[in-house]
Amino acid sequence: MIASLYIHIPFCRYKCAYCDFVSYPHAFQIDDLVEKYVNALIEELQWWRNAFPYLHINTVYMGGGTPSALPLHLQERIYKFLSGWQKGFTEFTIEANPEDINREWLGFLKEWGITRISVGIQTFSEELLRQWRRKHSISDSLHALHVLSQSDFDFNVDIIYPTYLPEVSDYSFQRDIDTVLKCNPHHISVYLMDIHEGTLASINVQSGRWKEVPEGRVVDDLSYLYEILKEHGYIHYEISNFSLPGKESKHNIRYWLQEFYIGAGISAWGFINFVRYENLPTIQGYIRGNVGKQFYKVSGKDVLSEYGIMALRLLTRGIERRRWEILGGSWENLIDRAKNVECIDVYEDRILLKDSVDCILVSNSVIEEILEPWL
Amino acid sequence: MHPMDKIRTFSIIAHIDHGKSTLADRFLEKAGNVKAKNVEQYLDQMDLERERGITIKSHPVSLDIDDFRFNIIDTPGHVDFSYEVSRALASCEGALLVVDATQGVEAQTLAHAYKAIENDLEIIPVINKIDLPAADPERVRQEIEDLIGIDTSDAILVSAKMGWGVDELIEAIKERIPAPKGDTEKPLRALIFDSKYDNYRGVIIYVRVFDGVIRKGMKIKLMATGSEYEVNELGIFRPEMVQTDELGPGEVGWVAATIKNIRDAQVGDTVTSAQNPASEPIPGFRKVKPMVFAGLYPVESEDFEKLRDALQKLALNDAALFFQPENSPALGPGFRCGFLGLLHMEIVRERLEREFDLELVITTPNVIYRILKKNGEVIEAHSPADFPDPSEIETIEEPYVRGEIMVPGDFVGPVMQLAHSRRGVMVHMEYPSENRVHLTFDLPYAEIILDFFDQLKSVSRGFASFDYDFIGYREADVVKVEILVNGKPVDALSFVAPKEYAVRRAREVLLRLKKVIPKQLFEIALQAKVGGRIVARETIRPLRKDVLAKCYGGDVSRKKKLLQKQKEGKKRMKKFGRISIPQEAFLEVLKVDSEGGKG
């Protein structure tokens, strides 16, 4: 069996204003908590290794949190374990903050077979970085991108599109994108900021300190994004993701196509043999070796709706007839619905979400409209 | 047969919470032959009755106290059912007028008391709750005299809760309420004052016998319809139905005669003998006539048959519910339904949703307009769709009510303003006691059917009470306002409005629709048209922005939940082609701000 592997590192040096992920910003100050976590993580990986002796791991993705903030000796223990499990992976990505990226570290990663870096640049506005409570500077970001572009790693740049903005003078989304493009990344992800309850961001929104960006401006900015990236040869292959040809995130595509993957670490998700599971988010239990898992059987209808939700976000693939039918869906029924929905192109063997700003901005509604019978 | 001189038949008139049920409890205790120990137990109420604190069906009971038979006929407590109230009162010789000694007379009590007087009943004023420190029986006594005009020198002071004055009241009932007059030898005449449908026995009619005797096996005839039946069973209410062999003059009871359709045994009709029929029916019969009409449509068109079944089932027990299939170009197949009033409509809707699990769209209720066309033809418009082209209309008439409002003096200003904004004309104002004002207005019925009572409560901080009676049709200067969605008229959103406010209301309605109709994938144009002219326009901009959140690993579950929620939200909406319109939209149309009509 082939599966991918996701490893979750729930530690950060600081908490960003918009973040609602499980992360322990103070963990590095707590004695040996991080070390104990890595021990437990390796135990969990060992468990998977024993449980599936014939498993071939296709891609690995280490996310967080801030995996790059993990002390080197602890990173090394994880990489060592993985290379003992299997010699080499098709793709091995690690998420990093700009301030952690330097030649030495990249050299260290290369030794352990890491192939791809995803760097959280988010913006080039000094003022926004401050409001978002990110502790790196613009020069950290530029330096990181420079080092990466000189290396032979594939790299992705994460940019956030702020749906709410404080009154700052130095922000321009278009300038952010232009700056990114100068560094020729292989891959660019642009997300609209989601305001989650309980975050500093939501307090700023509620109090009115951050104001909603007018719809017209969002449309203009995204139109610019789609156009300029196309000009530079990037393929808009997923709603929020762009890549040079052949440089899509192989790991993420496996999620989107409902392939199997193991998730290790607290609050990681996995999907194996049509069972989806979630590791519980409590670190105390986890380091004592109690990996609480919540299982969800993904039944026939769910397989279809989940595949549909993901596949329509894949703008160049869409819902493929063959796959839909293999999963037990009726192509006729799907086409019947798709025909009457805006923003959908229907072909003989697939249906696609139209690659235009107007359509992409309403993708949730479009997807819901088409998949309603399977939801 | 109970000896006539020992029968006393009466009704208890009281406002909600003035102590009717506690008083009824005391009577039950005094009667030896009743199993139920309290009223809750004896009233086999619908949930809705309990929740709303109103009586919808009659709940008669016959109690034997000493050697007397007390027939108590509980009456429906809402103006929608005022005809049923009048028939229940016509079955009585007397009425207890129960007034809370700490509160005073309320509008609804007033309306029922007037009806009791019209029916020549002997009224015994009962001032209740005299045990409470705030009780002011003298003030209440004065109020009853001023408002109702009856002598209160022999009013009975009671505390139903403590049991004070109950024996005295029982003696007063025996002495002051007249015994029934009737003749066993005359041809049978019995008044139907209510009925209910029983799955096994068919329609059970509730009757009060005036002359003659009903016996088991006898052939009876219902005078309004002329149909004949054989009596299978009959009896009295204890309060459960107990069989007897016959019912004689003055007696109150039930009769089962395999009547299949409740419409054949209408309230107010007279039961007589088929062999030896009476020459004249008991006066006062009126065919039940719905006053308010609205369209009921299933959200899912496939539920049409289910809705028909449900309406048929409800109609078995509700002679006032009228319905006929109607096809709306916008909403698909449904029914145009007639109701006695708004409360009746609400009850029917709630029962359909609760008991039959139907999701319904209900269109704005409207009154019946009488339209005289230029060609001399007169039509009754039950819905805005029935309105002819404006060029064909000579005059339009609409139903008016006389509304009685009781309110503390401090709120007279706001109440008058409200009534005025609803085209009300004040006909009378009096001060029955210090700081209580009795206002009488003539109002178009159309102005009160939706939210008048809510508005009244809100401008009087809950202190005002309200009741009304129909007083006939008057000429109206009204026009039909059509609402168009993306250029197509949506009949279910159209409404009728006074000409002078029509444009302003059209604008308000569009703004409100704009708020309740969620943004969709395409632009929606809302327009209002009066007499062929577009008078208002609003645009619902298309949905532009879902948040494009990350969607990895476990995110798909979250995403799916979000989409499922979206789907649920849409379930309660009705589709017009591709446009989803939520149910609230249909009721938003007629809501008017308290100052809304002016302008």
Image (spheres, rainbow, N blue to C red):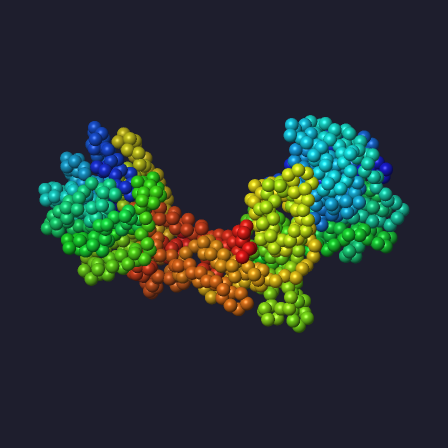
**Which of these two is toward me, B355 or A261?**
B355
Is the N terminus of chain B in the top left, top right, bottom left or bottom right quadrant? top right
**Which of these two is toward me, A139 or A120?**
A139
Q: Is residue B22 left or right of residue A339?
A: right
Q: Position of residue A3 (x, y in %)?
A: 25, 46
Q: Position of residue A44 (x, y in %)?
A: 25, 36
Q: Is residue B101 visible?
A: yes
**Which of these two is toward me, A278 or B421?**
B421
Q: Position of residue B269 (x, y in %)?
A: 77, 52
Relative to B391, is B71 above or below?
above
Residue B373 sits in which quadrant?
bottom right
Residue at 86% from the left image edge and 37% from the top image edge: B5
Relative to B240, is B470 above or below?
below
Specify the farthest residue to the right: B185
Specify the farthest residue to the bottom: B375
Residue at 31% from the left image edge and 36% from the top image edge: A281
Residue B280 sits in which quadrant?
bottom right
Residue at 56% from the left image edge and 45% from the top image edge: B459
Residue A320 sits in which quadrant?
bottom left
Residue at 16% from the left image edge and 42% from the top image edge: A99
Q: Is residue B187 left or right of residue B412?
A: right
Q: Position of residue B57 (x, y in %)?
A: 68, 44
Is the C terminus of chain B in the top left, top right, bottom left or bottom right quadrant? bottom right
